[in-house]
Image (cartoon, rainbow, N blue to C red):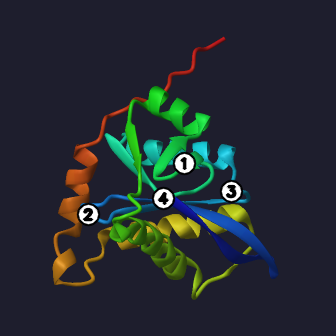
Amino acid sequence: SSSAASDVYKRQKLQRFFLAVFTFSHSNGRYAYLFRHQNTLAFMESHRNFFRQVKGVPYVMVYDNMRVAVKDFVGTDKTPTEALSRMCAFYRFDFRFCNARAGWEKGHVERSVEYVRRKAFCMKMDFDSVEEAGKHLQEVCEGLNTQAGSISTLDKVESLAADLLSLIHISEPTRHAQ
């Protein structure tokens, strides 16, 4: 999971939004969400949105060093924020932070964010609403998740299906009639 800023025009006025991107390491299946702020609420909401969309929770989530996930850095040790700890307890997943000595981990996360941002907002940057920009982002991710771009991604749909089958399945909360 990672996030980054993206400039998008809303009714021809340039505005900054933040992308929260989730990438499966096996299939490179990508899911992204647009937020006005890069804060704890957006961090938690992005996870809820992702888990609902994929109808499950990965057993382990890998995070880069974003401030909404890492509370303290002491040498190579990192302390998770209260929000991350609570989400782990609620959704029952484990986490780890990118290993500082394994540049490919952080690089994979950061490249995924940049790739999604470029594919979604390079050619089309002007939207009538945040909802329209978010819908466009979802459509781009759906396209990325079904397209094979090279020989190494020919089995992308099957790999993503395997990733989705390996999730901890969650059920939607039921609402009680009052």
Please tell me whether mark 4 sits on a helix, a strand or a loop: loop
What residue is disc 4 on?
64
* Mark closer to the observer (3, 4): 4
What residue is disc 2 on?
27
Q: Which mark is residue 38?
A: 3
Closer to the chain start, of discs 1 and 2, is 2
Q: Where is residue 78 in the image (x, y as percent from the top left)?
A: 50, 46
* Mark closer to the observer (1, 2): 1
Question: Please, is residue 116 above or below residue 174 in the view?
Answer: below
Q: Residue 74 carries which label?
A: 1
User: How far apart are labels 1 and 2 at the CA level?
Assistant: 33 Å
Determine whether, in the image, residue 150 is placed left or right of residue 169: left
Q: Residue furthest front?
A: 75
- The residue sitting at 36% across, 64% down in the picture is 101
Q: Which residue lies furthest to the bottom in this view?
A: 123
Q: Which amino acid does label 2 sit on?
A: Ser
